[in-house]
Amino acid sequence: MIKHKINSSLFVLNIVLLSLMYWDNSNLPWILLAAFMFFFLILSYGVLFMTFNYFIQSKNAFPKPHVLLTFDDGPNPHTTPIVLDILKESKVTAIFFVIGSKAKFENELIKRIIDEGHFIGNHTFSHHPIFALLNRTKVEKEIVELNHLFINQGIQTNLFRPPIGYTNPIIARVVKKLSLNIIGWNKRSFDTVIRNPKKLTKRLLFLAKPGSIILLHDNLKQTSEALSLFLKESQEKGIIFANKNQINSFLND
Ligand SMILES: [Zn+2]
């Protein structure tokens, strides 16, 4: 919120100064409009890009030389087990940001994710399509409801990733109240649009660089199909994926 507060204060100061300087200028409305547009541009950038850390402080890069894999939008009874099998075979640890409405039917899968050494995070209960436009009560309910489900499943986590990565002052206040640890990303796989597993493998190989946090989706067929070759080839190239201890220290840093 610090950047947002600084930007808002500067905006107000700017409006006052411009009004004083150009009070007798007929172009004053246009000058003020330009100042407002500039403020709005920065604000929009802050909403759309979590890496800007405008409203919320998030972790968007992993300490070099390691690479962290993160999977959103599961668990899925068909594709998540395949993803878990591949991770196990390649000895790679990941963070799964799960959706509550899916997790409530997949107790065994959730247990398997934890038992196999991975981390679980909150990705809201329903992954509401307009999560960033919800009021404070609804935003909090979306997060708390899934946290309760986790507790019933014997899981304790403070990890959170907002749907689509959009943030705003309301989400920031709820995050602060619930003391959530926000994990973003710095590499988007675009596995939601790249349906061809070969093309996706190629893109993932390009993205896997020291310090990368890669955003993937374990509910997608193409991701489960691309993962094996991607991990094999990147490990052969010398890419090192973060292990459980490294992820633990990163999360607690
Ligand atoms: Zn998502």
Image (cartoon, helix red, strand yellow):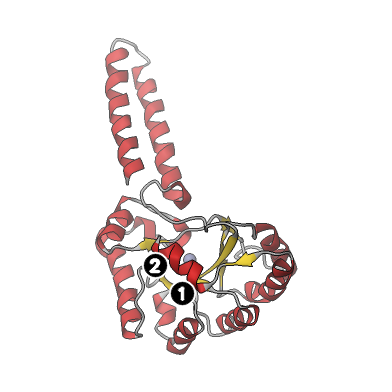
Indicate which disc, 1 or 2, sits on the residue closer to the N terminus. Answer: 1
At label 1, the amino acid type is: Phe
| Residue closest to the eye, 172 or 84 | 84
Question: What percent of the width, then of the height, locates residue 44?
Answer: 43, 43
Question: What percent of the width, then of the height, locates residue 57?
Answer: 38, 52
Q: Is residue 116 left or right of residue 147?
A: right
Secondary structure state at the residue bearing disc 1: strand
State whether label 1 is within 8 Å of ligand 1: no
Residue ID for mark 1: 119
| Residue closest to the eye, 81 or 87 | 87
Secondary structure state at the residue bearing disc 2: strand
At label 2, the amino acid type is: Leu
Q: Residue at x 49, y 55 (%)?
A: 60
CB within 8 Å, label 1 to label 2: yes
Q: Residue at x 29, y 62 (%)?
A: 179
Query: How far apart are the two marked residues, 1 and 2, measured between alpha carbons?
Result: 9 Å
Q: Residue 220 occupies which quadrant of the picture?
A: bottom right
Residue ID for mark 2: 159
Please tell me whether residue 74 is drawn above or below residue 60 in the rendered image. Answer: below
Q: Quadrant of the C terminus?
A: bottom left
